[in-house]
Amino acid sequence: MSQFAHVVGSRTYLFRDLRDLMAKATPARSGDYLAGVAAGSAEERVAAQMALAALPLATFLSEVVVPYESDEITRLIIDEHDAAAFARIRHLTVGDFRNWLLSDVVDAVALTSAAPGITPEMAAAVSKIMRIQDLVLVARKCRVVTAFRNTVGLAGTLSTRLQPNHPTDDASGIAASVLDGLLYGSGDAVIGINPATDNVPQVIKIVTMLDDIITRYGIPTQSCVLTHVTNTIAAIERGAPVDLVFQSIAGTEAANQSFGVNLALLDEARQAALSLKRGTAGDNVMYFETGQGSALSANANHGLDQQTCEARAYAVARKFKPLLVNTVVGFIGPEYLYDGKQIIRAGLEDHFCAKLLGLPMGCDVCYTNHAEADQNDMDVLLTMLGAAGCTFVMGIPGSDDIMLNYQTTSFHDALYARRVFGLRPAPEFDAWLRQMKIFTGDDYITLGAALPEPFRQALLGLS
């Protein structure tokens, strides 16, 4: 392995290899201290960032951070790297790459063209030497568009996942939350439920109920039950009306094994979903969630910092052409992201890296109740993500997930972000909202004054 060094005053800081350099250059967060890989001081962190900035991007193709022989994610990154797309930036250092990304000559077309040549480690490296405004500005220039029953990620849009979780999977409770969300314009990314009872019959029951709602009201959106991928495959085999296949993923083979998945299984699931041909606007059928700290919590981080591990998960997602990807940024807890400041930084890093790699990236702007964070911190992150062109955020009644017991963004929060930035839902969903008179007005989002008649009847049925 190589050794890297940087001199600060009369002191020389040595970094034993690329993995150590990347970890020491990472902005401070509790998970890296827990893993024992963080810089020992602010001065050491700056020295590592300076050494990293001088590193040629090509180094990441010759020196891997997780062994090629023992990790299928590393093999995926190296074997499927697009040398032609990389040619334009091959001569750059990490610092030069930052300057190139921020330059006025680099637009959405250039970033889309370069994305297949950028490895997750390159994206992680450049993010470590960027300020928050840099992360926002570059991510805003990235444009990633996907489609299933509607088109997600177009310029001028912000989509939402309507998350109507219920602690007992009660059908009336779920339906009431779905109705509430639709009346605030939520649900164009997906209506996605985390089941309280996670087995194949329950998955089939919930996905069938969601399909009935979508079909009955002609809603141009897609549903998903966030269960293990093997349950979804089994549900498809039993004839369930599955739209999207969900799976949590991580950035090392060992971490994915702890989730009970590998690349072959994910490919099997994607092929099963594609065989149903349920998409009307496109065939992006996968939905992935990630989160900084997942590899460390599985004792599968290989001595890497958590943000580099997170970026490597995006290589897994990219392979399967997903409709949606999101980082559940504050969900794992303060052991990994201690407070609001760390959560805000991590959310913007994750969004930037994923967009740079060509993914339709959203964010679950969230925190657990034992973190040093509050809803004001989430307002800051939501607003910054709105400025950065985030693909989608969560919509939950009152910001409080009563099944998973964490705090995230509400239907009102998503409406706020759309109004502040002049953003609309996916166009097909936006047209449906106006047809139903849920949204009115031509130039901005105004909620209709009256409850649509089909929903009034549904509400009477729930009472």
Image (tube, helix red, strand yellow):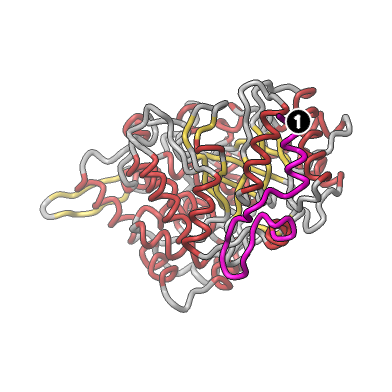
Asked if residue 201 is among those painted magenta in the image, a careful observer would answer no
- In the rendered view, tell whether residue 412 sits above or below residue 440: above
Q: Quadrant of the C terminus?
A: top right
Q: Quadrant of the N terminus?
A: top left
Q: Secondary structure at mark 1?
A: helix
Question: Number of marks in the image?
Answer: 1
Residue 283 point in image, percent of width and height: 78, 54
| Residue 76 visible in the snapshot | no
> Would residue 347 be found to the left or right of residue 83 on screen?
left
> Would residue 112 be found to the left or right of residue 371 on screen?
right
Three-letter code for the amino acid on which mark 1 is drawn: Ile
Which residue sits at x=36%, y=38%? 374
Which residue sits at x=69%, y=23%? 198
> Would residue 95 be found to the left or right of residue 426 on screen?
left
Find the residue positioned furthest to the bottom.
105
Q: Quadrant of residue 461?
A: top right
Depth order, front residue of 228/42: 228
Q: Which residue is mark 1?
A: 206
The magenta region covers: 434-463
Q: Quadrant of residue 455?
A: top right
Find the residue positioned furthest to the right.
239
Residue 151 point in image, percent of width and height: 70, 59
Residue 131 point in image, percent of width and height: 33, 58
Which residue sits at x=60%, y=61%? 424
Residue 162 point in image, percent of width and height: 63, 43
Q: Categorize mark 1 by other alpha carbons within 10 Å: few (<14), some (14-19), many (20+).
A: many
| Residue 259 visible in the snapshot | yes
Depth order, front residue of 432/380: 432
Asked if residue 442 is among those painted magenta in the image, a careful observer would answer yes
